[in-house]
Image (spheres, rainbow, N blue to C red):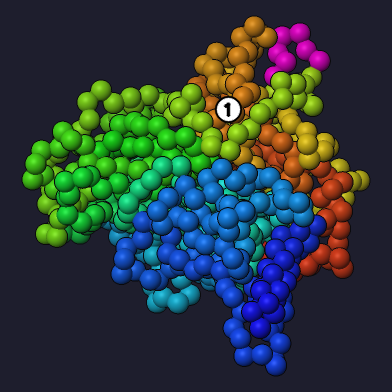
């Protein structure tokens, strides 16, 4: 029986591995085991490891990584957080190329389980900072009675299949939900961008998003229906996996830093009203620190968000924190008094650790950091401010008259069993509060990329040989049917101004046919290359309209160079591209009046949105679609008869179109 037992376990493992993720198949819900145990035996099959992710509290068994299908593997993360799973011959760890393919043509990742969530988008009211926001739009876990902000925490483990059903219970809006930073390899139908990958989900309808956790780390999900996420439709994502440095405890759910207003962003955008937001940490803030706001009853102002981390110890405990900027227009520099930060991940990319006092977090960016109490902290001091500064240069001074010092005190890092007290801790001196991304020289990915020195899209040029150039353009007057248009992201070769705009009822996913002609407002850059090709994109802000946090869907990208000089004066001699393992992420800050040069491999067919993550700028047209390998995309998603994803997308559109036709809503912005 022992031999039969081993043979059966091997067969089950091989079947599961081969069926987990094929490049050309639709994702389908399925059980982990493809075959059952023969009925004539009573022997339970061997199972792979099931364990709590590193850093979990000893008494917390609510979430576990489940690799039951990986028979013969062991959890190696308990004593070494850079390791995840091993069987002696095969190891999944921090060095695994999570974008590479194995011998079967599948992504390099473990075989996890299916994790299912159901969340509801609904109208609501929320007291975050002392004032009521009665026009909020919030998520609710279907198992809970009340909506919440931020939305439910989506957790998974590296290699899991994630299935999230989104129900739209909003009264006057459609919605679509984007899983920010998820690569969606050969899976564009789950990217959640209305007008690009789907029609909006009509009120009363639902949509099921299914995707594999091919990456690991921290991210968030949010509505991509125009500026809707500013009204509250955001939530955290954690995909547990290895880390590049050792830590002891992961004490809290992710820390979401955001700006917050008290009227719907839709109405403020249409009225052209200047925004005066306050700052929230995980849904808690103090409005009296901003714009001279007052409240009827000071008791309505909540206590600062507090992280309770247990007693101070002689040997400082190392805490893993997950920092995410979910703002609609605000950039932050985050610090914790008397705690240095060891940065180990940026935007789903594990990096070689570096240490800093402050972390610059642009909109949409994420950082995993390890913090520990500095030796200089006074003995007996147990409460320390978590601070979120707003860099002046990132706001053009808009915030300067609208805040009361110390506005940046947004949370408390608390030691001890007693209740937290108002900290008396002092901020770190000599902080860098400039409007620039984290130093790219410090961001060295663990899994290396070597970018070729010549991209396949290098143009013939005399002055600029850095690939295709997209210029951030401000234009006026706006088209009569698009009154909010203000920005465009156009090829430098075009003299005309084209603000990006989608058609809710005609998503690009359902229009992959090669013969289609794109309309004037569909700014699409077709890319017809192979999976091994690299392209360069240069993004310019020659008009000084920035800075702009630019986000690309469907890819991480390498950051080859960032400069503050205008593209118009950029010469070949000015180029100094970092090609040997450059920094990479999925959101990059374009400096005011400057440029960035990025590169990515065209290995993910489909339509991918690229846009500014200042929600107002995206709504005003600052974006484009990259149509990547259109023939391959069309072969994968030919029609509803051969693709369940196309069939489901058509169903959602069939429900959306009659609702939209009778709605009083109008599309006066880009739609994303």
Can residue 420 be seen at all in this image of the molecule?
yes
Is 559 on the left-hand or right-hand side of 508? left
361 vs 143: above or below: above
Q: Residue furthest right?
A: 515
User: x and y percent of residue 466 in the render?
Assistant: 70, 19
Q: Is residue 466 magenta?
A: yes
| Residue nearest the observer in this picture, 385 or 340 | 340
Q: Residue at x 81, y 50 (%)?
A: 633
User: x and y percent of residue 468 in the render?
Assistant: 73, 25
Disc 1 target residue: 582
Q: Main secondary structure of the magenta part?
A: loop
Can residue 209 be seen at all in this image of the molecule?
no
Start-end of magenta stretch: 460-467
Q: Residue furthest bottom?
A: 40
Q: Residue at x 78, y 12 (%)?
A: 461
Q: Secondary structure at mark 1?
A: loop
| Residue nearest the observer in this picture, 569 or 476 | 569
């Amino acid at each position: 029986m022992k031999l039969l037992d081993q043979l059966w376990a091997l067969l089950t493992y091989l079947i599961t591995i081969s069926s987990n993720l094929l490049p050309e198949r639709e994702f389908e819900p399925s059980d982990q085991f493809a075959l059952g145990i023969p009925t004539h035996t009573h022997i339970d099959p061997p199972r792979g490891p099931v364990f709590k992710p590193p850093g979990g509290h000893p008494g917390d068994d609510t979430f576990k990584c489940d690799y039951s299908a990986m028979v013969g593997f062991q959890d190696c993360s308990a004593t070494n957080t850079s390791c995840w799973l091993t069987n002696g011959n095969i190891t999944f760890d921090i060095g695994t190329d999570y974008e590479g393919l194995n011998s079967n043509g599948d992504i390099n990742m473990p075989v996890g389980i299916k994790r299912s969530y159901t969340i509801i988008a609904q109208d609501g009211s929320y007291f975050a900072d002392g004032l009521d926001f009665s026009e909020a739009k919030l998520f609710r876990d279907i198992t809970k009675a009340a909506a919440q902000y931020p939305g439910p925490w989506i957790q998974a483990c590296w290699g899991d299949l994630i299935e999230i059903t989104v129900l739209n219970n909003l009264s006057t809006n459609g919605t679509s939900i984007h899983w920010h930073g998820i690569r969606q390899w050969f899976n564009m139908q789950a990217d959640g961008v209305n007008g690009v990958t789907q029609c909006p989900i009509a009120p009363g309808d639902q949509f099921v998003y299914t995707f594999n956790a091919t990456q690991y780390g921290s991210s968030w999900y949010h509505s991509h229906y125009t500026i809707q996420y500013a009204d509250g439709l955001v939530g955290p994502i954690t995909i547990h996996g290895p880390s590049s440095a050792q830590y002891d405890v992961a004490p809290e759910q992710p820390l979401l830093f955001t700006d917050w207003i008290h009227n719907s962003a839709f109405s403020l955008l249409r009225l052209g009203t200047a925004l005066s937001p306050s700052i929230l940490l995980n849904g808690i803030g103090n409005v009296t620190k901003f714009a001279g706001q007052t409240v009827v009853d000071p008791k309505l102002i909540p206590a600062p968000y507090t992280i309770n981390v247990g007693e101070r110890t002689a040997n400082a405990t190392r805490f893993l924190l997950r920092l995410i900027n979910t703002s609609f227009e605000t950039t932050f520099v985050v610090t914790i008094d008397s705690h240095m930060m060891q940065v180990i991940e940026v935007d789903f990319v594990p990096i070689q650790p570096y240490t800093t006092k402050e972390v610059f977090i642009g909109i949409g960016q994420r950082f995993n950091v390890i913090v520990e109490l500095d030796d200089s902290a006074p003995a007996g001091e147990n409460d320390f401010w978590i601070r979120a500064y707003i860099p002046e240069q990132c706001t053009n001074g808009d915030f300067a008259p609208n805040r009361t010092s110390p506005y940046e005190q947004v949370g408390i890092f608390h030691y001890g069993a007693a209740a937290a007290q108002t900290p008396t801790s002092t901020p770190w001196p000599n902080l860098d509060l400039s409007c620039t991304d984290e130093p790219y020289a410090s961001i060295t990915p663990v899994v290396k990329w070597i970018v070729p020195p010549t991209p396949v899209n290098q143009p013939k040029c005399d002055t600029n040989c850095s690939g295709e150039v997209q210029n951030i353009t401000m234009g006026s007057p706006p088209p009569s049917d698009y009154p909010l248009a203000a920005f465009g992201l156009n090829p430098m070769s075009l003299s005309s101004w084209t603000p990006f705009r989608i058609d809710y009822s005609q998503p690009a996913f359902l229009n992959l046919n090669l013969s289609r002609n794109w309309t004037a407002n569909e700014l699409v850059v077709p890319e017809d290359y192979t999976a091994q090709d690299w392209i360069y994109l240069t993004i310019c802000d020659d008009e000084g309209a920035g800075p702009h946090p630019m986000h690309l869907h469907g890819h991480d990208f390498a950051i080859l160079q960032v400069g503050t000089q205008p593209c118009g004066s950029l010469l070949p001699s000015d180029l100094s591209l970092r090609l040997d393992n450059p920094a990479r992420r999925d959101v990059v800050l374009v400096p005011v009046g400057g440029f960035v040069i990025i590169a990515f491999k065209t290995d993910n067919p489909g339509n991918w949105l690229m846009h500014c993550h200042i929600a107002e700028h995206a709504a005003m047209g600052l974006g484009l679609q990259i149509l990547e390998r259109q023939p391959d995309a069309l072969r994968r998603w030919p029609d509803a008869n051969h693709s369940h994803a196309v069939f489901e997308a058509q169903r959602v559109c069939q429900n959306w179109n009659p609702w939209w036709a009778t709605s009083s809503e109008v599309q006066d912005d880009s739609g994303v």
